[in-house]
Image (cartoon, grey):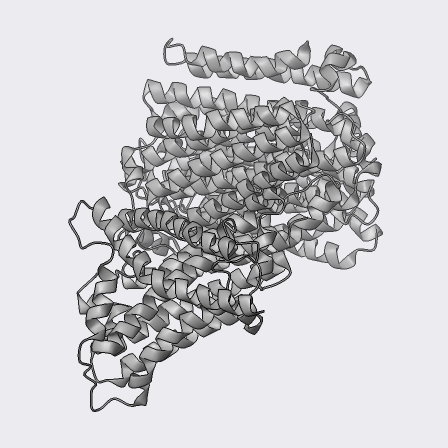
């Protein structure tokens, strides 16, 4: 492989990673539940693209496997499973009152992303000289953005997507530093998203049946303090 | 030396002449997409011609600012056209006067005077538009800054002639994330600064919803013609920066001969018209944002530009 | 083949439970299979103590996937033991709730799958696989937590799932970094043993990062303090036998994964792994001790006590090699005692029909068995002599004091005392005093006056009390050897 091709592949991989980061920001800020899902699908496709490009670059069959598993499990099986397990209403939900308003949330998200760079770069350097490209810091950034999404959203689907985005971030960083972990990573990718979607989907369905809402983040009756106060809150 | 001065003036002439055509083509394309029967694409020329032959009415209560502003709005894009590569890929005679940052400031000067002039008359709609423009401007400012910083970081320079080569040598650099994300952010900026659709509706006639247009409501005759022409040139100049410096630095004249430079004119126009198609798609598929969601739109632009900067600076 | 059989039995039970064969079928199958598993695990532990490697471990093809040493054997033994007593307890307890047959089957299927996923954690040798089964424990236990389908149970399950999966994401990245560290250190087989061998060659910075990521990620599921918020909810809203499993062994088996990293970290000079453990442990123990004081739900009381005990175990690990034996003993004692406590709390719940501490008075008159068990459990879990926890806490404090860590040990002793008063003050009020029958929530007491516990609950209480009593005064020789082997597995 010529140097120019290598350079091109590295740049394309970095581009996929950069757009991956943008989808992470999008998931923090998108109001529409459906939009969140679409962003997640785009994110998974970009993860697959990054894995395939790195596989091409380093000639690693294992990374092709990661790309393939990602391509099948996340954009296809996850929405399918979601439709099977969770109530249909979660797609059409819009979130008007997020915990933080969107510009503030985006600013904090930006600070998180910048911070993750200072962690990710030394980490990538410690692994070895052939870990190029922004995969590690961007992976960490999206991991943090996913966690941040979990704290600012209340609606079920965005919360679910936040968790899945965290896993995506971990994998984006992982494929750059642990290139030949073998089939186990593929297994982890395949099972993990499905476990998350299955359990959350089942819970959301139960919550909607019992409580009549899919804004799961609003459930907050369990806490310490006097029993009367807790009972009052449960009534509200 | 004389050639360089001449080419430089030719650049100005191209901007002057083709800017109305670009906006005419844009509105014609939009009409075609929306299956309307609109005026021809040369309509802006006729408009300008008509306005130059009309009487100008100036409010007695307005100050000198109101009278001078059309000239400033008209001159600033011309000044910028001296600095940036419109036709040639090498710096021309006046290019030493400023870099991309300078060009940005010169354009901002025109915007500043337009805002003052809008407040100058007692027209109630002027200040509304002026304050909205300032709001968009404030929000766009950090994005502009980060875009320029990233450009200068990548290219080691803010001089457009150096920057434009950096992105395409080798060609793999074209796909660098910093480049693609910067272009995305810059397109969003052009939409905001040019008053295009997700931010402002340039063809709207409802004063309360106007952002950019309401600043020129009080102008008439020659003043209005200058303001209008200046606005068209500003968009053209921004498109030149986007296309010739950031996206596609091909088709510019590399040689010093007259033939090469004259050949560059249709090529550059071709690029501009191609991009206008993209703009039409954007404008036809999006709807105008509510005023307070403009912050979110520019927030997205900011995030994009920051992502561009980070992927570049922190590349291990 | 015994190890494979140990893992297969709960899976077979899961399938058998789904067959529709009468009311008693599902619970009977679960109890029988758990007992069989307990016998097999005990035999395996015996073999490990005797120094005889089981057949699989001698086979090279298996040894990359399966490994059992003293530490794994201890955890396996605890899982099988508590799994069995909780299964026995479930028989009467769940039947008392009178669920529909479908939900009953679902409960036992999840129960067996949960036991399987926990048994797989100490057996598997490959960290990524361990991570996958940890996810599996989350899946099964979340469905068990939400079993009652009430608003509170669903809220608890939701919080549990979100935080655990969040932690799992972080831990996953940690395991990937761990692999990268190994790769950067020249490679080897990615197993616990392989990690131990490769540790001196790994870049310290990467190892450090991996350790912290896994500590935070899995620490969420253990219930370490900044990440503990889900634990009291989930451990109190679940059906009581499940609470015993969650508090007694699930936390411990996840903690086991973190413990596996300590010998690896010892290869790195200046790794501070022990300091992290000490600090996080003290914070957890302290926060939980103070939160104990203001609970209003007695199942939450024991849930917070779990957080406290996880803190104590981590503190002990933080003291270094000499306290490892005490830490292992604490793990053992906490598991048997905490499961007993939840059995007692469940008995009180059956008798009184409410989880509110304020609503329960004079439990000992309404149900002497439940009242006595509750007070006994309270004394045992807070470390009253001569019960099991006292012994291990005392030995931890002793090691700490001989090392001259007066501040840490002073804090730990203070937290233990606060927890003692917190728990006993609440329980005293519940057990003694004039009896009241509270407004029933969803457990309807059949008759006022005295209440008779289901037979299987009584049996589970007696079975659960035996180790609590015995281990306080006498640790049998094989068990002592097992604990010593487990402690030895924590040092290089």
Which residue is at the front of the view, C239 or A186? A186
The residue sitting at 44% across, 14% down in the picture is C17
Which residue is at the front of the view, C376 or C20? C20
Q: Is residue B239 above or below residue A93?
A: below
The part of the image, by quadrant, that contains residue A212 is: top left
Which residue is at the front of the view, B192 or C160? B192
The part of the image, by quadrant, that contains residue A189 is: top right
The residue sitting at 80% across, 38% down in the picture is C202
The location of residue C394, given as percent across then percent down, is 74, 45
- A6 left or right, relative to C55: left
- A217 left or right, relative to A87: right
The location of residue C156, given as percent across then percent down, is 42, 41
Q: Is residue B240 above or below residue C168?
A: below
Q: Is residue A56 visible?
A: yes
Q: Quadrant of the N terminus of chain A?
A: top right
The part of the image, by quadrant, that contains residue C46 is: top right
The location of residue C144, given as percent across then percent down, is 44, 30
Q: Is residue A2 above or below residue C478?
A: below
Q: Is residue C450 visible?
A: no
């Amino acid at each position: 492989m010529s140097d120019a091709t290598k350079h091109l592949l590295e740049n394309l991989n970095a581009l996929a990673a950069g757009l991956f980061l943008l989808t992470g920001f999008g998931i923090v800020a998108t109001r529409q539940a459906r939009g969140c899902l679409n962003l997640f699908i785009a994110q998974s496709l970009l993860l697959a693209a990054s894995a395939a490009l790195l596989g091409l670059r380093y000639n690693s069959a294992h990374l092709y496997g990661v790309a393939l598993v990602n391509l099948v499990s996340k954009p296809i099986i996850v929405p399918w499973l979601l439709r099977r397990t969770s109530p249909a209403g979660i797609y059409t939900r819009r979130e008007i009152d997020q915990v933080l308003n969107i510009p503030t949330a985006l600013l904090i998200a930006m600070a998180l992303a910048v911070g993750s760079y200072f962690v990710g770069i030394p980490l990538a350097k410690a692994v070895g000289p052939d870990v190029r490209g922004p995969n590690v810091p961007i992976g960490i950034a999206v991991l943090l953005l996913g966690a941040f999404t979990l704290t600012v959203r209340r609606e079920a689907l965005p919360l679910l997507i936040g968790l899945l985005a965290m896993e995506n971030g971990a994998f984006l960083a992982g494929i750059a530093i642990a290139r030949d972990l073998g089939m186990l990573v593929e297994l982890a990718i395949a099972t993990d998203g499905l476990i998350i979607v299955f359990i959350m989907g089942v819970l959301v369905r139960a919550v909607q049946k019992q409580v009549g809402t899919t804004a799961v983040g609003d459930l907050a009756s369990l806490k310490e303090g006097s029993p009367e106060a807790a009972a009052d809150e449960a009534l509200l | 030396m004389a050639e360089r001065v001449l080419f430089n003036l030719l650049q100005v002439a191209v901007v002057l002449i083709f800017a109305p055509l670009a906006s005419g083509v844009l509105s014609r394309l939009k009409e075609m997409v929306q299956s309307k029967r609109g005026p021809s694409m040369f309509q802006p020329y006729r408009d300008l011609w008509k306005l130059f032959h009309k009487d100008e009415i100036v409010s007695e209560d307005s100050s000198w600012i109101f009278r001078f502003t059309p000239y400033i709005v008209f001159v600033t894009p011309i000044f910028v056209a001296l600095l940036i590569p419109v036709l040639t890929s090498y710096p021309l005679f006046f290019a030493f006067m400023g870099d991309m940052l300078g060009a940005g400031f010169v354009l901002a000067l025109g915007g500043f005077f337009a805002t003052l002039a809008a407040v100058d008359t007692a027209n109630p709609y002027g200040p509304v538009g002026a304050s909205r423009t300032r709001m968009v401007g404030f929000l766009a400012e950090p994005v502009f800054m980060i875009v320029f910083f990233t450009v200068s970081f990548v290219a080691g320079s803010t001089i457009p002639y150096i920057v434009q080569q950096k992105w395409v040598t080798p060609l793999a650099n074209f796909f660098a994330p910093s480049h693609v994300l910067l272009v995305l952010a810059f397109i969003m900026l052009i939409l905001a600064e040019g008053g295009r659709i997700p931010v402002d509706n340039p063809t709207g006639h409802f004063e309360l919803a106007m952002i950019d247009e309401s600043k020129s409501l009080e102008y008439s005759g020659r003043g209005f013609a200058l303001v209008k022409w200046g606005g068209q040139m500003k968009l053209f100049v921004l498109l030149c920066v986007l296309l010739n410096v950031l996206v596609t630095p091909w088709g510019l004249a590399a040689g010093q001969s007259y033939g090469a430079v004259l050949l560059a004119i249709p090529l550059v126009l071709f690029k501009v018209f191609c991009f206008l198609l993209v703009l039409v798609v954007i404008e036809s598929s999006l709807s105008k944002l509510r005023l307070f969601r403009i912050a979110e739109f520019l927030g997205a632009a900011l995030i994009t530009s920051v992502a561009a900067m980070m992927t570049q600076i922190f590349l291990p | 083949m015994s190890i494979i059989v140990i893992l297969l039995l709960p899976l077979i039970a899961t399938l058998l439970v789904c067959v529709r064969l009468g009311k008693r079928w599902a619970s009977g199958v679960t109890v029988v299979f758990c007992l069989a598993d307990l016998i097999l695990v005990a035999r395996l532990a015996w073999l490990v103590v005797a120094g005889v490697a089981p057949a699989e471990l001698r086979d090279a093809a298996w040894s990359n996937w399966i490994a059992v040493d003293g530490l794994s054997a201890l955890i396996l033994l605890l899982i099988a033991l508590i799994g069995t007593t909780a299964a026995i307890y479930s028989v009467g307890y769940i039947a008392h709730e009178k669920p529909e047959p479908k939900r009953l089957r679902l409960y036992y299927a999840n129960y067996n799958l949960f036991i399987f996923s926990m048994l797989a954690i100490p057996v598997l040798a490959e960290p990524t696989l361990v991570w996958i089964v940890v996810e599996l424990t989350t899946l099964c236990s979340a469905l068990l937590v939400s079993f009652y389908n009430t608003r509170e149970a669903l809220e608890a399950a939701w919080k549990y799932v979100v935080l655990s999966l969040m932690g799992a994401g972080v831990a996953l990245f940690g395991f990937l970094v761990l692999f990268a560290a190994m790769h950067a250190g020249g490679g080897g087989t990615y197993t616990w043993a392989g990690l131990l061998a490769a540790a001196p060659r790994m870049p310290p910075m990467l190892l450090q990062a991996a350790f912290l990521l896994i500590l935070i990620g899995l620490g969420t599921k253990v219930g370490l303090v900044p990440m503990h918020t889900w634990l009291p909810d989930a451990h109190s809203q679940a059906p009581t036998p499940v609470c015993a499993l969650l508090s007694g062994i699930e936390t411990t088996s996840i903690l086991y994964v973190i413990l596996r990293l300590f010998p690896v970290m010892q290869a790195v000079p200046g790794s501070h792994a022990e300091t992290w453990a000490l600090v996080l442990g003290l914070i957890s123990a302290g926060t939980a001790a103070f939160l104990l004081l203001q609970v209003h739900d007695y199942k939450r009381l024991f849930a917070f006590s779990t957080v406290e005990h996880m803190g104590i175990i981590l503190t002990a690990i933080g003291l270094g090699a000499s306290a490892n034996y005490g830490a292992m003993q604490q793990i053992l004692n906490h598991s048997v005692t905490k499961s007993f406590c939840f059995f007692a709390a469940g008995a009180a719940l059956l008798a009184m029909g409410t989880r509110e501490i304020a609503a329960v008075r004079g439990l000992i008159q309404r149900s002497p068995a439940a009242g006595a068990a509750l007070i006994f459990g309270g004394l045992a879990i807070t470390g009253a002599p001569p019960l099991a926890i006292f012994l291990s806490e005392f030995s931890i404090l002793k090691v700490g004091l001989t090392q001259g860590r007066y501040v840490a040990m002073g804090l730990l002793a203070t937290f233990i005392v606060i927890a003692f008063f917190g728990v006993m003050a609440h329980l005293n009020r519940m057990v003694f005093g004039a009896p009241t029958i509270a407004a029933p929530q969803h457990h309807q007491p059949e008759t006022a006056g005295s209440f008779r516990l289901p037979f299987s609950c009584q049996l589970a209480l007696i079975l659960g009390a035996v180790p609590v009593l015995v281990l306080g005064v006498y640790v049998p020789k094989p068990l002592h050897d097992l604990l010593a082997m487990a402690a030895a597995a924590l040092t290089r």
